[in-house]
Image (spheres, rainbow, N blue to C red):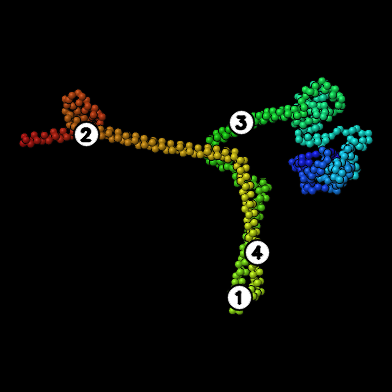
Amino acid sequence: MIIKGGTRAGGADLGVHLNRTDTNERVRLLELRGVAGVNLDQALREMEAFGAGTRCKSPLYHANIDPRADERLTPEQWGRAVDALEAKLGFTGQPRALVQHVKEGREHVHVVWSRIDIERNRAIPDSHNYRKHEEVARALEREFGHERVQGAHVEREGKERPARTPSHAEMQQAERSGLDPKAIKAEITALWRQTDSGKAFAGALAEAGYILARGDKRDFIVIDQAGESHSLARRIDGVKAADMRARLSDIDQATLPDARGARAEQAQKALDDAQKAEEARTAEAREAAQKAAEAVERADEADLTRWRSMPLNALQWEINTLRPDRYAALAAGQAAEPTYRETLEATDAAHAGAVKARGEALEATETVRSLKQKAERYREYQGLLGRVRFWLQDKGILEIPEWKRLQTEISKAQKLADKRQNDLATAEALHTEAKSALKTLDSAIAGAVDVAQAPEWRRYEVARSVLNERIEEDRRRAAEAEAERRAEEIRRRVDAEIEREKREGIEQQRRAEISKIPTIVRGLASITQTEQGTFRVRYPDLPSEELKRQQDLLRRYPDEAKSAVKAEFSERQVQAKREKDRGFDMMD
């Protein structure tokens, strides 16, 4: 067990430290004694105010009782430990505050006493408090059966003095700066041993990030990177103050900065380093963002190339698989958020409460209505005597018990109905509030889901745009092909029509030329038939061009020419026979 403590002021700052939940897993106020304050801050301020009428500058005594990590104390043992330390320090009956901390699974207790003796208006001495801490710790270890811890002041029994552990102030300093005092001591000791003069040591400290400065109460101090000051003599292991001064005698203290100047210099260095680190981080972030953007661009280009070469049905199927399932993501986000489940349960409970309250309010209202109807029927169905009794009751002369009972029931039922209406309004307000909270959580989860799914949606939309482009391209190509087909069909029809017209023209020309053949044949000078049955013709005396034209025409149409020649030959034979017969007739 280790007990540390000392006098101090600043009750407000101590209260902030003891109430910190960011550095402790659990903070529990165990006791407030002798003060009117109801919380730790009020109690510490009140205890510090006790010293306002004295010359005491440190009216508080703060101690820390810290057993080993594997040792657990019962509440009774914690009380015994605090009372034993209180009696040893001479604070019996003084106002005090007990706070239990659990840090990294390890329990320890902080005790703050007021040092001010109100009756004598003076501070209780705190002399030899380190020895008293160790005496109480050794006695409690024997009483609780805990493993003994070797101290520096009592029960040495010839053993070497253990290495000095950091004080509570040094531990708080380390917590503020984030630097381990043991590591600082080891580093400064190593630098001391590596150098042989004060100037060399100061230069080595500067290279390591420390600044050697002149102290207000000590010869030399060291300002660390966080601006915290350290006594140089306490940060060099195994070196006496006289030896330290002898080594540093070659340094003029007047040339060294004071603590404030050194802290300002360290703050400026920290600011410069932070700016450089921020610039480096910004450059790295910019480079990483550029690389990520380039990677995304390359992936997009690869996807575009692949999507543009895929069959449309395969691309459509892949797009269906790429579409993010927002509803499933919302459901998963809601299931992963404990607050959402709790709010949903609270909303359902509030809805059920509102439904129940609405039913109870309707039931109470119906009861009031029923009782009023019953009272009206009672009064309506009275005879003449009854009406006289009601007249006397209205005048205040007579009282009808049954009517009074009914009015009492109506009054109670009305009060219950009013209460149920108030309950209904409260339930509906709770339901509205729960729905609003649930809607807010829904919006937050939906926003987070949309942010998380933004890359997937972007890829999905790009794939859809590629599909639409390809569909539009296919439609354009189909339209162009259809237009080309129709144009080709028109061209074919036009060509066919032209060909038909050509054929008809040729045919007409042929017919016209054929129609000239009989005329040409009739104009032949003579037509004779050979033994073989062929015909010989003799053209008349014509100009050479006309003769050549007739000959070419007959050669072009040999069949028609032969038929015309044959017909003309027969006609001439018939004509010759007729003329012969006419000659015979004339002779007769």
Q: Amino acid at mark 3?
A: Gln
Residue 333 percent across, percent down from the top left? 64, 45
Q: Earlier in the sequence, mark 4 or mark 3?
A: 3
Q: Nearer the viewer, residue 39 or 482?
A: 39
Label 2: state its secondary structure.
Answer: helix
Residue position marked by numbered label 4 in the rendering: 415
Residue 233 percent across, percent down from the top left: 84, 28
Q: Which residue is mark 3?
A: 290
Q: Is residue 584 above or below residue 354?
A: above
Residue 172 lies in quadrant? top right
Q: Is residue 424 left or right of residue 119?
A: left
Picture coordinates of residue 210, whole percent (x, y): 77, 27
The mark closer to the camera, 2 or 3, is 3
Mark linked to residue 391? 1
Q: Is residue 51 above or below residue 211?
A: below
Q: Secondary structure at mark 4?
A: helix
Q: Secondary structure at mark 3?
A: helix
Give the alpha-carbon distance from disc 1 to disc 2, as whole Å: 142 Å
Residue at x 64% of width, y 71% of height: 406
Q: In this rendering, does residue 553 appear at all?
A: yes
Q: Residue at x 61, y 73 (%)?
A: 394
